[in-house]
Image (spheres, rainbow, N blue to C red):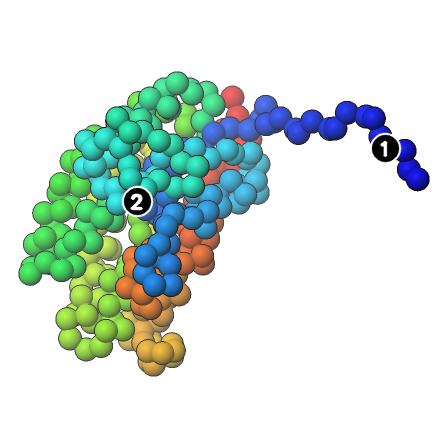
Amino acid sequence: PTTPSTAAAPTLPTTPATTQLYVSLGDSYAAGYQPGPSGAGTTTRNGFAYLLPGGATAKGYSLSLVNFGCDGATVESMLRTAGCEQIGPEGQIYATQPQAAAAERFLTDHRGKVALVTIVIGGNDITKCALAGDPTACLTDAVQTIKADLATLLQGVRAAAGPGVQIVGLTYPDLALGAWTLGPGPGQNLARLSVPAFKALINPTFAEAYAAIGAAFVDVTAASGAYGSLDETTTLAPYGTVPVPVAKVCELTFFCDRRDIHPTNAGYKLISDLVVEALKPAAATAP
């Protein structure tokens, strides 16, 4: 029989000195939320923030995720509401501070160790307008409120992170396109209105705010096909003939089959890939 080895068990490797921190901020998209088969869901590791460190290795990064994302967060709650009821897996706990304050403290305390901050926020501020009596007026008011609060939020994050840290801001798939599958009437009218709302109002507001702090802006709406022609159609079971942009949002989110606003695995993968694409090569950011 083989004599048992008396050698000490190998120690686990320590985190490489080259590993840098990646800080994720925002709402349920940041936290990785997905619905369950019956509707009720939870935050998952399928979220883009959890996928991103793996994808970023292609750009020369070794990233360790620090996730402040909170299901249900709005721009206002990030600034003014303490705590979070549902964080992402192994997410940061900040029971006595708003998300922005907790994140700013972390960024300040870890100056020189953070390579990337992603921010996805604003979706919960605008989705309420889909059910408003006058969606256009509601959206116009909501965007003005977002504009003021988002500027405050982003200025705080930039000041805490420092001038050299990459910050990437995100927008959303045009979920309202999925309302097309409800059939002719209000659903399809909402879908038609949503495209110019994102293209001319929502995303330009986001883009301007992120540009003001020297951050990159990723137009997830465009990348998920929302700006394509509604006259170009395809067949999608069980809905029959639908516009191509509608079919894409049905594939990338759970809106069409579960009336849920969150991304499928394919949707989260797309978002992660888009952020990686926006990153500068790690060598270009080295001290």
Mark 1: secondary structure: loop
Q: Position of residue 16 (x, y in %)?
A: 61, 27
| 142 sits left or right of 275 in the view | left
Of all residues, the one furthest to the bottom in this rendering is 240
Report the front residue among 260 and 10.
10
Give the quarter of the image for residue 130. bottom left
Examine the rendered structure and indicate whether residue 232 appears above or below residue 48: below
Examine the rendered structure and indicate whether residue 6 appears above or below residue 59: above
Mark 2: secondary structure: loop
Q: Residues within 10 Å of mark 1 (few under 14, many from 20)?
A: few
In which quadrant will I find the N terminus?
A: top right
Which residue is disc 1 drawn over? 4
Q: Position of residue 135 (x, y in %)?
A: 11, 58
Q: Residue at x 51, y 21 (%)?
A: 287
Q: Residue at x 27, y 73 (%)?
A: 181
| Image label count | 2
Report the front residue among 165 and 85.
85
Say which amino acid is labelled 1: Pro
Q: Residue at x 17, y 41 (%)?
A: 146
Q: Is residue 96 visible?
A: yes
Say which amino acid is labelled 2: Asp
Q: Position of residue 259 (x, y in %)?
A: 28, 64
Q: Is residue 116 visible?
A: no
Q: Which one is in front in this view, the residue at disc 2 or the one at disc 1?
A: 1
Q: Residues within 10 Å of mark 2 (few under 14, many from 20)?
A: many
Which residue is disc 2 drawn over? 71
Mark closer to the chain start, 2 or 1: 1
